[in-house]
Amino acid sequence: MKQRIITAVIALPIFLVVLLSGNKDYVGLLLTACAGISTYEAVSMLVSKFEGLVSDKKYSNRALLLSVVSSVLIVFSLYVWGPEYSSVVMGFLFYFLGLIIVSFISGDNALAVVRIAAIVVGVSYGSFGWFFIWDLFSLQNGIYFVGLLCTIVWSGDTGAYFGGKSFGKHKLAPRMSPNKTWEGSVSGILCSSLGAYIFCYFSNIALPTSGIIGMAILAGMTAQIGDLVESTVKRFSDVKDSGFIFPGHGGLLDRVDGVIFAAPVVWAFIHYIL
């Protein structure tokens, strides 16, 4: 517990300082690094397990390297050339070129298929959430929109934990995460809604109350799905944590699984609904 507290005290202020600085260079590099780390963790968990299904050989690092470089290029190209989505073409071209290369250098067709599957899932999981977070940050008042996203997810996590601990009786998804309950889930969504409303009120974000609540409910639900997905991936891969970057807390995905799943929901509400 002491290690977890020390890690949280160090890591969270660094993230908040970079975000609140409003400096696009710092934030862009931070999100690019997060995409690379997330992809590394996701593919590390998946590729060895996938390859173990068809071969007893130790997995190659080529798939891992291609995945990380692809994610970094996807997010970095968005940072360099702005929010125009055509700017991401370079990253995707390298991504698909990497898939072709992996299929040719793999020892057999079965290995090629599982490596490609690991790359597709890992890059999608590791990069796309950061793509939407960067686009949110690039908007006018973007700092507040990213803050709103984090508030929705973190308020929901807190509410789900204490609500489940106090009232939890009915299991939500025992195969995916045995400790989560329906009572905790509902508590989390309620806290996401309350947290979003309070954040918008004090930050003077001019959004309709009904839209704020609707966005918080849907984003809160999606964040919980992200948490369950990551739990399922870890169970499938027979690992306790997604990585080791945060001592006492595990990997980056262990901390941001809900954020990267909820980011597209908040992005869609801001762009098309509110």
Image (spheres, helix red, strand yellow):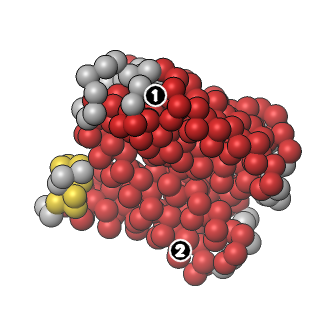
Q: Give the percent coordinates (x, y) of residue 83.
A: 80, 53
The residue drawn where x is 74% and y is 37% is 76
- Residue at 40% of width from left, 37% of height from top? 109
- Residue 239 occupies quadrant: top left
User: Which of the labelled discs sits on residue 222, or is there none?
Assistant: none
Work out whether residue 48 or residue 29 is closer to the camera in this orientation and state it: 48
Residue topped by disc 1: 106
Q: Is residue 148 left or right of residue 1?
A: right
Asked if residue 201 shows in the view, the reply is no
Which one is in front, 218 or 161? 218
* Residue 270, placed above or below residue 148: below
Q: Residue at x 32, y 24 (%)?
A: 1
Residue matched to label 2: 213
When the figure is inspected, residue 192 is found, relative to residue 273, above or below; the finding is: above
Which amino acid is tagged 1?
Ser
Residue under the image location 55 percent in, 71 percent down: 215
Residue 182 % position (x, y)? 24, 65
Which amino acid is tagged 2?
Ile
Would you say 210 lies left or right of 30 here? left
The kind of secondary structure element at disc 1 is loop
In front of the other: 106 or 37: 106
Instruction: Write down the quadrant of residue 26 in the picture.
Output: top right
10 Å neighbourhood of mark 2: few (<14), some, or many (≥20)? some
Pinpoint residue 18: horizontal percent, then vertical percent: 71, 34
